Amino acid sequence: MKDFDKQHILHPYAPSTPLSDMELVKSASGVYLELDSGKRIIDGMSSWWSVIHGYNVPELNTAAMEQLSKMSHVMFGGLTHEPAIKLAQTLLEITDESLEYIFFSDSGSVSVEVALKMAFQYWNSQGNKQKNKILAFSKGYHGDTFGAMSVCDPITGMHSAFEGVLNKNIFAQAPACGFDEPWDEQYIEDFKTKLQQNHTQIAAVILEPIVQGAGGMRIYSPEFLKRVRELCTQYGTLLILDEIATGFGRSGKLFAYEHADVAPDILCIGKALTGGYMSLAATLTSKKVMQGVEANGNVLMHGPTFMANPLACAVANASLTLLLSSPWERRIQNIQTQLNEELRKCEALKIVKEVRILGAIGVVELNEAVDLGFMTPAFIREGVWVRPFLNLVYIMPPFVITKEELTHLTTAIFNVIKAYQEHKTL
């Protein structure tokens, strides 16, 4: 099977002829992946940040099976169903009270596409066609579809191959202030200037709150987000917050925007929404935005085939019940405390530039790019699954990870980075 995979199946951000063999996963349970060799490894990535309860969760399995016995899918055009209604009720209860409408989609990237459409239609429906740009941030990442790519970092991001065909948006400097750094107004000056100079063209600002994810795993001050919200309000610009990676407790708050005590005009969520069981996302917005979109008899022009898929919604309902009834805040705090105690030991290694930690996010930034050919098998030998990128070795473990399992994970990271440092000096 692995030979067939290597010859015919394309994997994310990888050549059609892989440089190394893929690991075949036979099963998964708790925080462990079982490989075809029989080796069990701790998943430090939560399958790209989505598997917050771990794998093979009885409550989520039951929800899926019960929904399968009723219907796995039905179109959402002209019809509705209980799982979607219950999920919408819960999401509107746990997000800011200003968010009153919800649009379900099938992936995080599509939720961003919907958010951008909302912003453009908000102004266009009211006769303002000048506002056709988005103000985004360098080091930002919002997905791989075309609209989402157009608001990712255009220089250091993953989409430079499409530069000639993407919409040309406006970019401000990435937030440069650390989470606990004293605030200085100079941190916001570039954004403020870009907004002042271009606000007549800007339909919305898009930003990952507090943590910039795949663009560099940067963790910044809540004060920066507060000032962005204030300036968007001052200049009459919509604010889109992309919580696809940070939502549902990952940063230590249920949603990362709560660190800054602000609210978006449009909110994107995904990834952990179903506990990592299947793809589902949503775009939430306010009555003000929807009234603007629907001015002059217009409607929001989007409608995925698998919109509000009942099976995914049922599992999402079970996942949210499990999360909200669990001691998730204490679990995240415990993970953060342990990461501070153990992962910061990497700072003693010369190859390490910085260690950053917030909630259940741990980042080790190196002084040079990682070599996956060296690190991936080294991590597996250590009994963990960690997938570095750029010059970053990072983890976002499931919330249910035990203290002993997390120690195994952090020890493996130290050992592999140390071995990599020694390898580079040979």
Image (tube, helix red, strand yellow):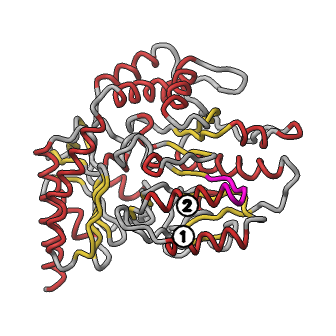
Residue at image position (37%, 66%) is 178
Seen in the image, is 257 located left or right of residue 126?
Answer: left
Q: Residue furthest bottom?
A: 426
SS at circle 2: helix
Considering depth in this image, is 183 or 362 the residue closer to the camera? 183
User: Taking 356 as reference, is 30 above or below it?
Assistant: above
Q: Residue furthest top?
A: 70
Q: x%, y% of residue 83?
A: 52, 21
Give the quadrant of residue 33: top left
Seen in the image, is 71 located left or right of residue 254?
Answer: right
Q: Is residue 353 magenta?
A: no
Residue at image position (81%, 38%) is 294
Q: Which amino acid is tagged 2? A: Arg
Q: Which residue is mark 2?
A: 227
How packed mark 2 is, by other alpha carbons closer than 10 Å (few <14, some 14-19, many 20 or more), is some
Q: Is residue 2 visible?
A: no
Considering depth in this image, is 18 or 411 the residue closer to the camera? 411
Considering depth in this image, is 47 or 208 the residue closer to the camera? 208
Q: x%, y% of residue 247?
A: 44, 44
Q: Which residue is mark 1?
A: 188
Q: x%, y% of residue 34?
A: 20, 42
Q: Is the Cβ of the residue at disc 2 closer than 8 Å to that at disc 1?
A: yes
Query: Which segment is the magenta one?
Result: 233-239
Q: Is residue 219 visible?
A: yes
Give the Cα distance between marks 2 and 1.
7 Å
Seen in the image, is 289 located left or right of residue 124?
Answer: left
